């Protein structure tokens, strides 16, 4: 089943007229940041050489996501403040924005996709922090990237994707399940193949591929954090299909139940306190998206 779906995804991607690429500068910077002895000067040079990337990084850094830092006006200054891990996080975020930016052809509202991505990123990071996961930043990046396949698939196979959307809305099913019915594969497979082509680190590819797994008991910790954050965001109306959920309280409760069931495998936290801490989430996400894309 898994191989079949991957083969189908691969065949679909072969039919794309233009294969989406990560900006060359971002790819180079990711490579440099993955080296053992990171040379931040070289990373800065690579990023400054691409004005679009540099400008986007500054916008992300100045957004409410990093509000504690004060105003940053140059990539070099930002690099000094942030260090390799955060810069890596920001570059991957900018990659996601880059590949989704030209998506006027997608039947999904791109603002909804961004809100969903930022929402899942923020919730996954906070969930990671609350269970003292070693690298909450990774949970954030993985959250941002997890649905990259959805955006790409919807852009390149617009007509069929509209059918999947109609099906999901009419039958009240997940967009993922509707994709499986229309395409015999899904954004999880497409996203995994894209991640491999873009040389994303393996742990992010794993999240992209596994976040809809029906076997949450066996997925990697990072994939579990993102899968739970994904269900939570959809539950409270931060969905890439726009506000779908008529009952946010019920949606939230279902997501919390899922957390109660699966979280103990990777850590413990006070779930009530955690959920209360997410009270302003929708506004926070809207502000972040607004400040980056206004
Ligand atoms: Fe997804
Ligand atoms: Fe998602």
Image: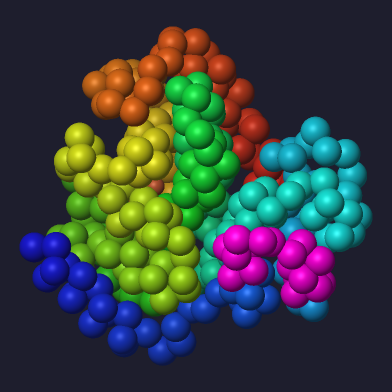
Residue 168 lies, in percent from the top left, at 25, 50
Q: Is residue 35 magenta?
A: yes
| Residue 30 placement: quadrant | bottom right
Give the extent of the magenta segment: 31-48
Q: Residue furthest left?
A: 1
**Quarter the N terminus occupies:** bottom left
Percent x, y for residue 2?
14, 62
- In this orientation, which residue lies closer to the viewer: 134 or 115? 134
Q: Residue at the far front: name it.
A: 37
Q: Position of residue 145 (x, y in %)?
A: 48, 55
Q: How many marks?
A: 0
Q: Position of residue 130 (x, y in %)?
A: 50, 22
- Please indicate whether residue 32 sits to the left or right of residue 259 in the image: right
- Residue at x-position 47% and y-position 30%: 133
Classified by dominant secondary structure, the portion drawn in magenta counts as helix
Side of 36 relative to 274 (left or right): right
């Amino acid at each position: 089943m898994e191989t079949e779906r991957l083969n189908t995804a691969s065949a679909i991607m072969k039919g794309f007229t233009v294969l989406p690429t990560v900006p060359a500068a971002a790819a180079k910077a990711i490579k440099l940041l993955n080296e053992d002895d990171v040379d931040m000067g070289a990373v800065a040079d690579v990023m400054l050489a691409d004005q679009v990337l540099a400008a986007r990084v500054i916008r992300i850094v100045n957004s409410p996501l990093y509000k504690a830092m004060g105003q940053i006006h140059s990539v070099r200054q930002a690099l000094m403040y942030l260090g390799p891990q955060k810069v890596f996080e920001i570059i991957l975020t900018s990659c996601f924005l880059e590949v989704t930016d030209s998506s006027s052809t997608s039947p999904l509202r791109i603002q909804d996709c961004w809100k969903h991505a930022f929402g899942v990123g923020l919730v996954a990071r906070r969930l990671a922090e609350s269970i003292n996961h070693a690298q909450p930043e990774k949970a954030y990046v993985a959250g941002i990237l997890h649905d990259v396949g959805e955006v790409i698939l919807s852009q390149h196979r617009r007509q069929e994707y509209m059918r999947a959307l109609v099906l999901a809305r009419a039958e009240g099913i997940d967009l993922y399940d509707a994709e499986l019915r229309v395409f015999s594969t899904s954004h999880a497979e497409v996203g995994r193949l894209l991640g491999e082509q873009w040389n994303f680190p393996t742990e992010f590819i794993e999240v992209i591929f596994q976040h809809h797994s029906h076997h949450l008991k066996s997925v990697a910790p990072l994939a579990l954090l993102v899968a739970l954050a994904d269900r939570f965001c959809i539950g409270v109306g931060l969905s890439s299909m726009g506000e779908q959920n008529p009952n946010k309280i019920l949606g939230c409760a279902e997501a919390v139940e899922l957390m109660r069931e699966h979280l103990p495998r990777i850590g413990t936290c006070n779930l009530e306190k955690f959920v209360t801490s997410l009270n302003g989430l929708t506004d926070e996400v809207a502000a972040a998206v607004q400040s980056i894309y206004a």
